[in-house]
Image: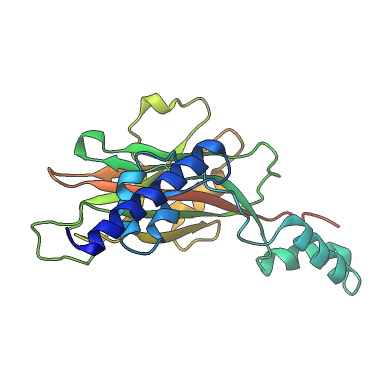
Amino acid sequence: MSPEVIFTLPAISAVIGVIILDQTSGKHTWHVEDIENLPRPFSFFAPILSYILPTFRLPMIQQGPSEPDAVQVASLLAQRLPADLVPDIIDMAELWVDIPLASSNCKMRVTENEAGRIYLLADIPSTFPPHALRSLTFRVTSRDQGWSETAFHYTYKESWTWFEVAILPPGTEESQGPFTGRHIITNINADFEWHTHDVTWRYDDENEDIRDIVRSLKPGYKVAICAWARYRNWVNRVQSARIDCQVHAVRRM
């Protein structure tokens, strides 16, 4: 056995032992991404450790303006402009408050047999002011099985794994699925790399159907990201997803 192997095997075992010890003792919460970012050869153990380490909900970090931000700008404008004009100016400037609705980094594998399976479900909050929703943003990190018999590798052509967004009216049970929704994302054909796609639906979208969906959403409705796959051997692999919404919070001064 070469000296490199004699050194590497105990080192790898020690790193894995420390990770598991930290995880169980609560000293550090390890995510699979932590292992993937380690130097080689330790990063090769990320797929194995993904079955050992538990998965966690992603932190719901606000990605856009907060309500205090919007209120502060509105207050400054009100010092120079008529107060009744300020809400419309804030709205036209798209200074909308970002509200994270749901996120997950639980890995999922969907084949044709499970097509339409819900990966992430978000509730429209009961605290929303009427007609205040301005947009929905969907972010998905995913890939397919990494190979295919088509001639369009590394493109979106003839890719048979994708995502749809389904709107569930009040009283709808998840068990009633699969739900046919509106297409948002297609995975790149035959690519082992994870890719992140962002899609935004706006209340003033060019697409009339999307406009109607955003404007019709009210408290009690649910928004679901569903994973789809078609044909044998096609696999939709999901790493993470999140749903955010943007709200016009300054309604009056």
| In-image side of 200 versus 94 (left or right) | left
Residue lying at the far bottom in this picture: please name it. 80
- Residue depicted at 67% across the width and 60% down the height: 96
Give the x, y percent position of residue 235.
22, 46
| In-image side of 196 versus 58 (left or right) | left
Give the x, y percent position of residue 202.
53, 58
| In-image side of 194 versus 80 (left or right) | left
> Is the C terminus in the top left, top right, bottom left or bottom right quadrant?
bottom right
Residue in the foreground of this view, choosing between 180 and 109? 109
> Is the N terminus in the top left, top right, bottom left or bottom right quadrant?
bottom left
Q: Can residue 56 be seen in this view?
A: no
- Picture quadrant where residue 178 is located: top left
- Residue depicted at 74% across the width and 68% down the height: 89
Q: Is residue 127 visible?
A: yes
- Residue depicted at 87% across the width and 64% down the height: 83
Q: How is the image coloured?
A: rainbow
- Picture quadrant where residue 246 is located: bottom right
Residue in the foreground of this view, choosing between 224 and 39? 39
Give the x, y percent position of residue 179.
35, 35
Residue in the foreground of this view, choosing between 90 and 140? 140
The image shows residue 19, relative to residue 194, as above or below, that is: above
